[in-house]
Image (spheres, rainbow, N blue to C red):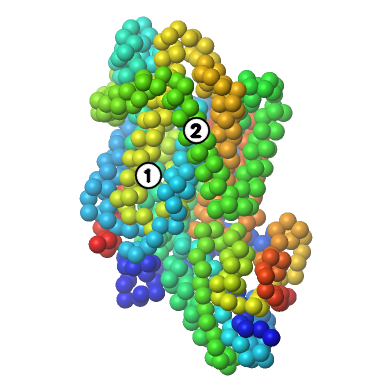
């Protein structure tokens, strides 16, 4: 409490007093020549279970395929109301905190100073949060929703159109398609990240608890979070992160391979994909060893500049007026359709609400420990209001602009009769669209670079996060541990890519979203309670 | 011959620093120069302290203990916050030599082995890049 001034962060904050010492359950072992500093149960259990999972999937691919082939749709279809409802709650809680007096609380204590500039901070938010997704879905998702909405029979039970669709009405289908896309990339995903990140930052920087997912639950479980309750929560976070990253790495390699074939004729073979994963992991390793500032931060800033250039290019080279007016129109369509799209019960568009929305929410939630922890680490010194404004509202607006530019351009091209984009496979839609604009060689190359560097930053920041969780919240554990996790991610991705278990892995990642949603709902309560105890900035 | 000694300390592993601390104290008395104990922490809670402020205050206490233990005449302490201490430690320490005005670093290290071919030891890295004299204690 405040009678121990040396315990408090900068200025005043309501520190939680606990006898737990960061690293008290760690073992400091030497494996071969390398010194380790790891949290005993969490490191061992997560490592062994992941290895076991990979062996199971490779040894019994049919059994694994049928189990996970059933599991993923079962989770997202049975619990669609739960995912949709929970995500709505996260948005309301995040916005509520922002506009309430709780927004005045400063992360790190009333006098804390921000550690990163806005540019560095934003770049890292996007690099970790959704950079890669924006590259792949910026063109393909608006096209999908537009096509399914305008199609004959949109709104029927077999249709994949959002809501009732807009059969035959191109203008309305365009609005609906953009609204549905923005819905998946706007307030909801960022609210999920914001809640997790804000909780982690608050409990670490203001309350003095270790930077680990379990700390969020201190107000609920008390000192039990240092025991098995906490071990389970942290292990779950490691699974979600590693499964999510390895899946992305595996699918990403397939997509990057397709892009490179399209551009340079690199054959699509297992060898190319394994080389791509190895290459991405190798660059990630260099970045990991270079540290947060020289590695992931610098790469994120480079990517941010490249992405901004590509966005600007599409706005200028594409249908500029359509994009600029579309920005306002799409924002309007988003607001208009938001209540119907986010409604968790009584939906008539099961394919869309379960197959798209519920799947997306489970996916964002399974990524949230990773992204949230990374965002938390770089957000000390910001006020809660500034934090939510910058992690929730600004990224949502950027998503609207991005989707409007890439998706809007693509839809315009499709409306002008260019069927190539609709026909192209998912991973090539972006390149097919860029091909229609000038300087396609250069822009497609930038696109490939962006995709690969976003993978590097994900792999790098993911290793950092897994290492911190498996070191019991220590951010200064020996570097070889990070190297281990980075290589481990690459190996899991390669093993499952060759053995054909990437779908199973993705199912596993998405499935961790379900228990994590429960965890996060409890976390919302803990967050509000903890914020209320904090002194507010003047 | 020297003006000030800088001694990097890892408050989590003081037992491993005994020899370096004693050497630093002897040198300080021999040349009659002050010692500055330097620590690096992250802003996230760690093993030693919950906050950078608590870390600084523990480091100050540590310096006072050393002063008493070895009968030193002038000690000082300075803590630095790093975004990523596992990686940026060496660089932070090298910058600290200039910042604290030290011209001799007395630093503990372990016996080099295989990993040093991949990751240089902290003392090795500081000795390689610092502009001042570095006394590595093994």
Residue B123: percent from left, percent from top = 68, 69
Q: Chain of mark 2?
A: A
Residue drawn at x 51%, y 58% is B83
Q: Nearer the viewer, residue A135 or A71?
A: A135
The numbered mark at residue B105 is none
Per the image, label 2 sits on a secondary structure element best described as helix
Disc 2 or 1, which lies upstream in sequence? 2
| SS label for mark 1 | helix
Q: Residues within 10 Å of mark 2 (few under 14, many from 20)?
A: some
Q: Which residue is mark 2?
A: A309
Question: Which quadrant does the C terminus of chain A fall into?
Answer: bottom left
Q: Is residue A234 left or right of residue A33?
A: left
Please indicate whether residue B16 sits to the left or right of residue A381 in the image.
Answer: right
Nearer to me, A219 or A418: A418
Tell me if residue A287 can be seen.
yes
How far apart are the alpha carbons under marks 2 and 1?
A: 22 Å
């Amino acid at each position: 409490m405040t009678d121990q001034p040396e315990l408090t962060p900068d200025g005043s904050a309501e520190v939680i007093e606990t006898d737990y010492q960061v690293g008290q359950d760690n073992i400091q072992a030497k494996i071969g020549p390398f010194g380790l500093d790891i949290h005993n149960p969490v490191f061992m259990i997560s490592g062994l279970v992941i290895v076991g999972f990979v062996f199971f999937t490779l040894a019994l691919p049919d059994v694994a395929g049928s189990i996970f082939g059933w599991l993923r749709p079962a989770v997202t279809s049975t619990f669609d109301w739960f995912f949709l409802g929970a995500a709505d709650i996260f948005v309301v809680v995040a916005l509520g905190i922002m506009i309430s007096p709780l927004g005045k609380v400063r992360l790190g204590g009333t006098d804390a100073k921000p550690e990163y500039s806005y540019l560095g901070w934003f770049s890292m938010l996007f690099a970790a949060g959704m950079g890669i997704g924006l590259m792949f879905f910026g063109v393909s998702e608006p096209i999908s929703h537009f096509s399914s909405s305008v199609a004959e029979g949109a709104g029927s039970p077999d249709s994949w159109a959002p809501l009732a669709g807009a059969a035959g009405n191109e203008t309305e289908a365009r609005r609906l398609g953009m609204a549905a896309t923005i819905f998946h990339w706007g307030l909801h995903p960022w609210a999920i990240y914001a809640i997790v990140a804000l909780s982690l930052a608050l409990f670490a920087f203001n309350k003095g608890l270790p930077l680990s997912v379990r700390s969020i639950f201190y107000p609920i479980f008390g000192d039990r979070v240092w025991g098995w309750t906490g071990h389970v929560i942290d292990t779950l976070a490691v699974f979600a992160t590693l499964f999510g990253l390895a899946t992305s790495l595996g699918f990403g390699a397939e997509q990057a391979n397709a892009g490179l074939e399209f551009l340079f004729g690199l054959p699509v073979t297992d060898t190319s994909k394994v080389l791509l994963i190895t290459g991405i992991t190798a660059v990630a390793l260099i970045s990991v060893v270079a540290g947060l500032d020289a590695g992931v931060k610098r790469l994120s800033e480079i990517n941010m500049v490249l992405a901004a250039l590509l966005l600007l290019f599409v706005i200028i080279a594409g249908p500029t007026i359509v994009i600029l007016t579309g920005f306002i129109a799409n924002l309007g369509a988003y607001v208009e359709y938001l209540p119907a799209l986010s409604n968790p019960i009584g939906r008539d568009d099961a394919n869309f609400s379960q197959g798209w929305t519920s799947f997306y929410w489970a996916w964002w939630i399974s990524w949230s420990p990773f992204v949230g922890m990374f965002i938390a680490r770089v957000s000390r010194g910001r006020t809660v209001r500034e934090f939510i404004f910058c992690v929730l509202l600004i990224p949502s607006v950027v998503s609207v602009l991005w989707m409007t530019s890439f998706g809007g351009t693509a839809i315009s091209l499709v409306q002008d009769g260019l069927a190539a984009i609709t026909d192209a496979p998912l991973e090539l839609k972006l390149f097919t669209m860029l091909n229609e604009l000038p300087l396609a060689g250069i822009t497609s190359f930038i696109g490939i670079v962006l995709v690969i560097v976003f993978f590097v930053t994900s792999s790098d920041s993911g290793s950092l996060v897994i290492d911190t969780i498996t070191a019991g919240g220590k951010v200064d554990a020996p570097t070889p541990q990070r190297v281990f996790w980075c290589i481990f991610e690459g190996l899991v991705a390669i093993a499952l890519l060759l053995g054909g278990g990437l779908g199973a892995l993705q199912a596993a990642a998405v499935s961790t979203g379900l228990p994590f949603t429960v965890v996060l709902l409890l976390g919302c309560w803990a967050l509000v309670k903890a914020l209320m105890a904090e002194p507010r900035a003047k | 011959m020297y003006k000030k000694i800088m001694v990097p300390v890892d408050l989590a592993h003081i037992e491993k620093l005994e020899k370096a601390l004693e050497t630093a104290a002897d040198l300080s008395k021999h040349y009659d120069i002050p010692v500055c104990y330097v620590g690096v922490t992250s802003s996230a809670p760690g093993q030693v302290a919950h906050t950078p402020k608590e870390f600084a205050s523990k480091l100050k206490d540590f310096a006072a203990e050393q002063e008493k233990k070895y009968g030193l005449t002038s000690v000082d302490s300075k803590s630095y916050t790093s975004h990523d201490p596992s990686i940026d430690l060496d660089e932070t320490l090298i910058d600290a030599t200039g910042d604290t005005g030290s011209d001799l670093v007395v630093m503990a290290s372990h016996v080099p082995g295989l990993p040093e071919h991949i990751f240089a030891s902290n003392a090795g890295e500081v000795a390689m890049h610092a502009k001042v004299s570095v006394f590595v204690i093994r």
